Amino acid sequence: MADPDASAEDRSIVRASADRARRAQEQERAALERETSARREAARQEREERRTAEEKRREEEAERRATEKRELAPAAEAKERERIETAQREARLAKAQWYAPAVRGALKKAARERRTTTWEEIGEKTGLHQMARLDLQEQVELLSAVRSVDSSSSSLRLHRLVAQRLLRELPDDDTALLNELADERLRLHRLL
């Protein structure tokens, strides 16, 4: 709203003043926009840096886990193998303990008759035909179980008689014999 009575000079002063005010406002607006833009850019860069840092942390964590898994894999495999071997050993022992009384009787009968016998023959005489399919480890476990069914002294006496018949020398002391048998069993288990 211009005053119609104002002089041209007054109007030009007002216009110049209004132009200066408008330019000052525009400069303030531009400065505010630059500041806002700079803040937005700084915030964007900070988010980008956080995202990059998080990605890097995740990658490092994934690499650490992969390395740890690679390092632990042999130990885990060994532990799993040991668990399987223990389960197999326990299964063989249970099977051996189930067969032991029948095998003990068949072996006693063969000993009374002063003859040798085979797994197949024992299976036929006891009715346990699956005896012929026992593997070496199961046979060893079974013979150990047969010996443990009997009392310790009679087992040792039987072992001494068999060793004497095979012309093998044994210690005279029962404790020394038991230690020797335990050592032989450990060596045998290591071979298997």
Image (cartoon, rainbow, N blue to C red):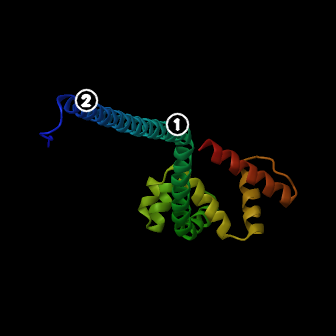
Give residue 177's mark: none
The C terminus appears in which quarter of the rendering?
Answer: top right
Name the residue that disc number 2 marks: 16
Residue toward you, 179 or 43: 43
Query: What amino acid type should be assigned to the residue bearing mark 1?
Result: Thr
Relative to residue 179, is residue 123 drawn left or right? left
Q: Decide: is 48 above or below 173.
A: above
Residue 186 seen in the current view:
yes
Find numbered disc 2 in the image and state the secondary structure of the residue it sits on: helix
The picture quadrant where one finds residue 58 is top left
The N terminus appears in which quarter of the rendering?
Answer: top left
Circle 2 packing at 10 Å, graded few (<14), some (14-19), many (20+), is few
The image shows residue 41 at horizontal and vertical percentages of 37, 34
Name the residue that disc number 1 marks: 67
The picture quadrant where one finds residue 182 is bottom right
The CA distance from mark 2 to mark 1 is 74 Å
The image shows residue 95 at horizontal and vertical percentages of 51, 64
The image shows residue 97 at horizontal and vertical percentages of 56, 67
Q: Residue at x 76, y 62 (%)?
A: 156
The image shows residue 33 at horizontal and vertical percentages of 32, 36
Circle 1 packing at 10 Å, graded few (<14), some (14-19), many (20+), is few
Find numbered disc 1 in the image and state the secondary structure of the residue it sits on: helix
Q: Residue furthest left?
A: 4
The mark nearer the N terminus, 2 or 1, is: 2
Query: What amino acid type should be assigned to the residue bearing mark 2?
Result: Ala
Q: Nearer the viewer, mark 2 or mark 1?
A: 2
Count of numbered tags: 2
Q: Residue at x 65, y 70 (%)?
A: 149
Residue 118 seen in the current view:
no
